[in-house]
Amino acid sequence: MINSSTSGTSNTAAPQSHNQGTTNKGILDMNAFDHHSAQSPAAKRRLANQGAAAVLFYQQPIEMVSAQGAWMQAADGTEYLDCYNNVPCIGHSHPAVTEAVSQQLSKLNTHTRYLVDVVDEYLEALKARLPAELSNVMLTCSGSEANDLAMRVAMAHSGARGFIVTEAAYHGNTALVTDASPSSLKRGQLPDHVVTIPAPAKSYYAADITDPQQAELAIRQGFARDVQRAIDTLQQRGHGVAGLLVDSVFSSDGIHTAPQGFLADAVAAVKRAGGLYLADEVQPGFGRLGSHFWGFQFHGLIPDVVTMGKPMGNGFPMAAMVTRPDLLADFCQTTGYFNTFGGNPVACAAGLAVLQVLKQENLLANASQRGKELKQGLLQLAREYPTLAEVRGQGLFIGVDIHNASGQPCASTTKHLIEQLKQQKVLSGAAGLLGATLKLRPSMTLNDREVDFFLTAMRVALRKSTID
């Protein structure tokens, strides 16, 4: 099989490398602070405390002191529009979450071996947002834990240990999940039981196809074909297929949602091979897409396992794995599972407040409308500035491919644009196999004035980038 990663981190079943002559970017390298550059006292303090594991954004890291709604405030008084951090999905420091957490913390916070009403109230409210088949919820503290548990459930059910992920996937940081997160690796290669496939990118599967319907068909068929090749590879290696683990909008791969429903053929192939479909909703879940509460719903599918985290508690650490009772029973026959802090009453109070605010403030509709405005504005800018290539995404989850003057995807150009946006008081990030996609995930409370603020900042940043 051909290794498509120039850094040796991919173990792909694709028929050929689609990024020859380029450099793949690890997720922690994107938009990262250079430890060897000039350091503020605060940055030096962090490096002294965390050493080589420290991860900070921007060439001059920002010292944050507070945040409200879609805005964050730095120690020097600068206010930034946060278009990067999807954790506070209903806005930073939302008063409903603050109140719910404060009240519950003042009464009781303990593990789940006692019956506490708010825990089951939350579980039932969450399940009301999910397909009826997915009725067992295991609460954890992080998306990494949720994905770790999901993979273990898939292995217990299938009797296999092989997993299929995309080339720039990130699913967490436990040992098991890091093995299935190629974007986390800086050198070496993935283990033999993990095979990668290209992301469902138009630039890869339908680059030369001008007819939209034919392009959509090519993506759907091509992605399913590469999943089947990965299945064949895992079976040839003797691992079998435990599951297809994919972020429902392929966030780390550069945000790929079109064509709607394209995942169906790939999922069908995995199920025929005895594997499970594991939907990682840690980034796209909880209504960010606007049209649907979950990414898998956008594709018209019911997963075997769903994982979630990040926006679940609007900043309070909580996550979950949701599955069918039969699958969880298979796992529990051989393995006990208990999480001391997962599902604690304070987390459940936070999560319940998030679900209530999403409904009360009609934030899915807002995400849909503001997302359309953002995309329309970006498409207009793309007609003026060739630096902006493909604009894609759904709701308030948008990716923009960034090209250099030669018309090629370019991580350094992307990083420069991100720095220019910072100068215009907008926070953003990078994604994609090459680190050449601008990733935008503003708060779902984003209003029309904030959309205008972003588009004005983007225009200035593009103009300055062109001059520089």
Image (cartoon, rainbow, N blue to C red):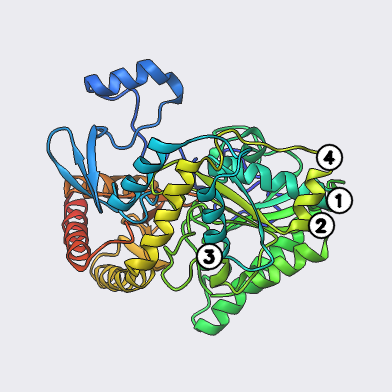
Q: Residue 366 or 318: which is nearer the viewer?
A: 318
The CA span between labels 3 and 2 is 27 Å
Q: Which residue is mark 4?
A: 334
Q: Is residue 278 left or right of residue 60?
A: right
Q: Position of residue 102 (x, y in %)?
A: 34, 40
Q: Is residue 125 left or right of residue 375?
A: right
SS for callout 2: helix
Q: Which residue is mark 3?
A: 295
Q: Residue 465 or 322: which is nearer the viewer?
A: 322
| Mark found first going from the N terminus, 4 or 3 | 3
Q: Amino acid at mark 2?
A: Asp
Report whether residue 262 is seen: yes
Q: Which residue is mark 1?
A: 236
Q: Are marks 1 and 2 in contact (CB under 8 Å)?
A: yes
| Mark found first going from the N terminus, 4 or 1 | 1
Tag in front: 4 or 3: 4
Figure quadrant of residue 281: bottom right
SS for callout 3: helix
| Mark found first going from the N terminus, 1 or 3 | 1
Categorize mark 2 by other alpha carbons within 10 Å: few (<14), some (14-19), many (20+): some
Q: Which residue is mark 2?
A: 232
| Mark found first going from the N terminus, 3 or 2 | 2
Q: Amino acid at mark 1?
A: Gln
Q: Residue at x 50, y 50 (%)?
A: 118
Q: Is residue 97 left or right of residue 433?
A: left
The CA span between labels 4 and 1 is 27 Å
Tag in front: 1 or 3: 3
Q: Position of residue 348 (x, y in %)?
A: 48, 47
Q: Residue at x 76, y 67 (%)?
A: 269
Q: Amino acid at mark 3?
A: Gly
